[in-house]
């Protein structure tokens, strides 16, 4: 069960959701150069390029988590800050999440790797139609703690990513997300390359309406053999 604190038209409420489906949109960039950058950085760690873009992967809804600590098997995973679309009974909402992925498994199969790690999501939501008019002004940012140092890991405006309506229109299952569906909307390239971290912090800033969504989690690496 997930709990979200929603903000719309200056009003706030809290809602609980038992997610029923999880979709992860991959290679969702609007800029071909940015897409190539992300494909190249994954190729550098042995991940084969996609057959087409964007790609829509399915993963178990049970992998979604809002906990402050994410347990992963082995040292080869890393986070990716992404805008997240949440379909509720009263429409579409925008949140924030991390497509945390096992990079070693990704070299074998991307769909497999998506299933192997929990998918952290923040507790804040904005009504999507309130931010769509200024989507390109939203700023996505992530910091990672690597070898004891907090570094800027991702940063950029969402002008680099396809809009939610564009992603939905291209989805093989059709443009309508059933209530209870969560869709990750693509990511920005990692500054300095993809690498593991002990802590991952992310933010989605709306400079037009003057508000920010945030979420953070620590990564606990479990040994492969006890």
Image (cartoon, rainbow, N blue to C red):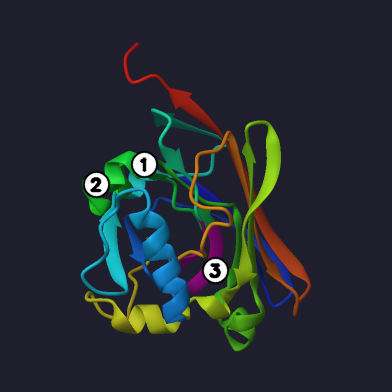
Q: Position of residue 41 (x, y in %)?
A: 42, 58
Instruction: Identify the secondary structure beneath mark 2.
Output: helix
Q: Tell me the distance, in whole angstroms, between the alpha carbons under discs 2 and 3.
A: 26 Å
Q: Earlier in the sequence, mark 2 or mark 3?
A: 3
Q: Residue at x 47, y 67 (%)?
A: 85
Q: Nearer the viewer, residue 125 or 116?
A: 116
Q: Which circle marks residue 112 in the picture?
A: 2
Q: Kindly indicate the quadrant of the structure image that contains residue 224.
A: top left
Q: Residue at x 61, y 88 (%)?
A: 133
Q: Is residue 99 left or right of residue 146?
A: left
Viewer can see residue 167: yes
Instruction: Identify the secondary structure beneath mark 3.
Output: strand
On screen, residue 60 above or below 89 = above
Instruction: Identify the secondary structure beneath mark 1.
Output: strand
On screen, residue 102 above or below 139 = above
Instruction: Give the main secondary structure of the magenta stretch.
Output: strand
Q: Name the residue tied to disc 1.
A: 102
Q: Is residue 98 left or right of residue 32?
A: right
Residue segment shown in magenta: 81-96
Q: Tell me the distance, in whole angstroms, between the alpha carbons under discs 3 and 1.
A: 25 Å
Q: Which circle marks residue 94 in the picture?
A: 3
Q: Tell me the distance, in whole angstroms, between the alpha carbons under discs 1 and 2.
A: 9 Å
Q: Earlier in the sequence, mark 3 or mark 1?
A: 3
Q: Nearer the viewer, residue 83 or 28?
A: 28
Q: Earlier in the sequence, mark 1 or mark 2?
A: 1
State which mark lies toward you, 3 or 1.
1
On screen, residue 201 above or below 206 = above
């Amino acid at each position: 069960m997930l709990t979200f604190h929603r903000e719309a038209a200056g009003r706030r409420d809290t809602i609980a959701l038992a997610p029923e489906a999880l979709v992860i949109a991959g290679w969702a960039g609007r800029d071909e150069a940015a897409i190539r950058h992300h494909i190249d950085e994954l190729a550098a760690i042995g991940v084969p390029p996609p057959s087409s873009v964007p790609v829509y992967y399915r993963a178990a809804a049970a992998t979604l988590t809002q906990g402050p600590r994410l347990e992963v098997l082995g040292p080869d995973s890393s986070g990716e800050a992404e805008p997240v679309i949440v379909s509720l009974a009263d429409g579409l909402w925008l949140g924030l999440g991390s497509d945390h992925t096992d990079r070693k498994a990704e070299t074998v199969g991307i769909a497999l790797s998506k299933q192997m790690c929990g998918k952290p999501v923040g507790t804040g939501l904005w009504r999507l139609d309130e931010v769509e008019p200024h989507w390109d002004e939203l700023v996505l940012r992530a910091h990672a703690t690597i070898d004891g140092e907090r570094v800027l890991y991702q940063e950029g405006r969402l002008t680099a990513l396809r809009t939610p309506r564009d992603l939905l229109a291209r989805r093989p299952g059709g443009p309508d997300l059933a209530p209870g569906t969560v869709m990750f909307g693509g990511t920005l390239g990692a500054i300095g390359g993809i690498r593991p971290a002990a802590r991952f912090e992310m933010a989605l800033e709306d400079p037009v309406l003057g508000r920010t969504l945030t979420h953070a989690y620590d990564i606990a690496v479990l040994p492969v053999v006890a």
